[in-house]
Amino acid sequence: MHQSAHDPPPRVLHVTQPVDGGVARVVVQLVRAQLTAGAHPVVACPDGPLTTTLRELGAEVRHWPATRSPGPVLARETRSLARLIDDVRPELVHAHSAKAGLAGRLAVRGRIPTVFQPHAWSFEAVAGTTAALALSWERLGSRWAHRTVCVSEAERERGVRAGIAGHWAVVPNGVDPEVFRPAAVTTVRATLPPAVQDTAPLVVCVGRLCPQKGQDVLLRAWPEVVRRVPGARLALVGDGPDREELAAGAPESVVFAGAVTDTVPWYQAADVVVLPSRWEGMALAPLEAMACGRPVVLTDVDGARESLPAELAPRCLVPPGDPAALAASLSDLLSDPPLRESLGHQGRRHVLAAHDVRHTAEAVGEVYRELLGDAWPAARVAPTEYRESIHS
């Protein structure tokens, strides 16, 4: 199937439930790349910050009134999505995350080439009967995905071990190194809230305030960090359902920055960036931090090792749910400026080589071409000074 100069550009319909943080940034990255490549991406999603950003890019956005989680309204949401798909008539549907993956595959049932991207498995986010139901659905729904795109080999292996059959593709997450780039710490801190403008050692955690991201474990580790590195400060950048509970027990050395329109200066201002997640597919925050030349401390969950250069893993990975190990790693880095500088340089080089968003866009384009043939154009991302405007 070849596209001639007179053919209309191919349409891909991206489908997503309410999302923020990494998933929203991935959708924005793909849409920008596909617009640049001459395709016609359409996004079906609820109203929110994501829709504003997409429209600023010039993308077509269709309102899909979906909630974040499955529930009694799923049947109505699926029917609504089916009508929307009939109206858009895309050549391919790309469903992001569990809820949209569920509704999207139910609405299409294989009639149109369908790509499902879990962005971390749904059955890891829940327990008991709910986890069993989520896993049963993923096993069933795999028959209606022509490709299941995982962001790490570990995520794919987790799906295979769980008994999910599929036509797999692994496309590591990427970031734009022209946006996420090093800067002088003192200069950047002057632009941030007064609580972090001084020269005190600063740890930054960017992510939604929710159980997945593990900020509660970080707060349990924090008193030991302050004991070993007096004056250290911790900035939690992001918002979410756990904010009130986390803030209630947090000491004065912890700053709750809330949702921000631009995470870049927070990474640039950090001495160390930490992400204590309980589960991931491959988190974007560590890649963004490394692109800014900052050392990272991560929990050893799916995708973490694959996001790091091999030589950084011993210094930068700790077991999930282990406050003592987390405190020790953070304290060691805060106490060793030359090591931080070395790790930051190594991380930046690794992102440039392995996690440039242009590579990600090209790899997703290859997945589409496997399904659509030459009708899908080559995916390219032009260098840009674009600043992300999705809440983290």
Image: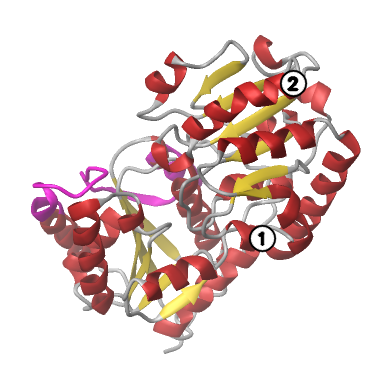
Q: Earlier in the sequence, mark 2 or mark 1?
A: 2
How crowded pointer 2 is (Cα within 10 Å; few <14, some 14-19, many 20+) is rated as many
| Amino acid on which the number 2 mark rests in the picture | Arg
How crowded pointer 1 is (Cα within 10 Å; few <14, some 14-19, many 20+) is rated as many
Q: Residue at x 25, y 76 (%)?
A: 144
Q: Total of numbered circles in the picture?
A: 2
Look at the image and say whether residue 76 sits in the magenta stretch. Answer: yes
What coloring was used for the rendering? secondary structure
- The residue pinned by badge 1 equals 355
Judge left or right: residue 185 versus residue 324.
right
Look at the image and say whether residue 72 sits in the magenta stretch. Answer: yes
Pick the front one: 319 or 352? 319
Question: Where in the figure is residue 39, as x and y percent of width and height?
Answer: 47, 67
> What's drawn in magenta, residue-wise?
51-77
- Residue 189 circle label: 2
Q: Secondary structure at mark 2?
A: helix
Q: Residue at x 87, y 46 (%)?
A: 342
